[in-house]
Image (cartoon, helix red, strand yellow):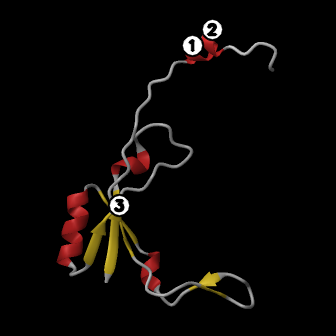
Amino acid sequence: MQVRIYRPAKTVMQSGYGGNAKRWVLEYEPRSPQVPDHLMGWLGSDDTNRQLHLSFATKEEAIAYAEREGLSYRVVADPKRIFRPKSYADNFRPDKMEFGRF
């Protein structure tokens, strides 16, 4: 079975580096496509492994678990985070002021 190991992106409600940014997730790659149910319109699949999302504290723990279980894995590199310091006073700099627009 093929699994994917990655660090999830932070949600829109997070502003710092806490929360999802510290953990690693192991999830199974889908084996079959999702098909809509004709009566309700919900998406369904016969692949129950797509419901599993295992969390680990480090990438090494997730890799060790995949190797111990005999799973072929793919590590997705987390995107480079760019920290741009901002100041509230920058909103009122003279070179950024636009007069007459409210």
Q: Which mark is residue 89?
A: 1
Residue type pointed to by label 2: Pro
In front: 92, or 96?
A: 96
Q: Is residue 78 above or below residue 74?
A: above
Tell me: 70 left or right of 43.
Answer: left
Number of callouts: 3
Q: Is residue 88 above or below residue 64?
A: above
Tell me if mark 1 has few (under 14), some (14-19) or many (20+) residues whose alpha carbon lies within 10 angstroms of its own. Answer: few
**Whole-number angstrom distance, CA of label 1 to CA of label 2:** 11 Å
The residue under the point 47% across, 48% down is: 10
The residue under the point 21% across, 81% down is: 70
| Pair 3/2: label in front | 2
Residue type pointed to by label 1: Ala
Is residue 25 visible to the viewer in this orientation of the structure? no
**Whole-number angstrom distance, CA of label 3 to CA of label 2:** 43 Å
Q: Earlier in the sequence, mark 1 or mark 3?
A: 3
Q: Position of residue 89 (x, y in %)?
A: 57, 13
Q: Earlier in the sequence, mark 1 or mark 2?
A: 1
Tell me if mark 3 has few (under 14), some (14-19) or many (20+) residues whose alpha carbon lies within 10 angstroms of its own. Answer: some
Mark 3 lies on a secondary structure that is strand
Q: Earlier in the sequence, mark 3 or mark 2?
A: 3
Q: Which mark is residue 6?
A: 3
Q: Position of residue 97 (x, y in %)?
A: 68, 13
Is residue 47 visible to the viewer in this orientation of the structure? yes
Mark 2 lies on a secondary structure that is helix
Residue type pointed to by label 3: Tyr
Q: Is residue 1 above or below residue 52?
A: below
Q: Which mark is residue 94?
A: 2
Q: Position of residue 54 (x, y in %)?
A: 36, 68
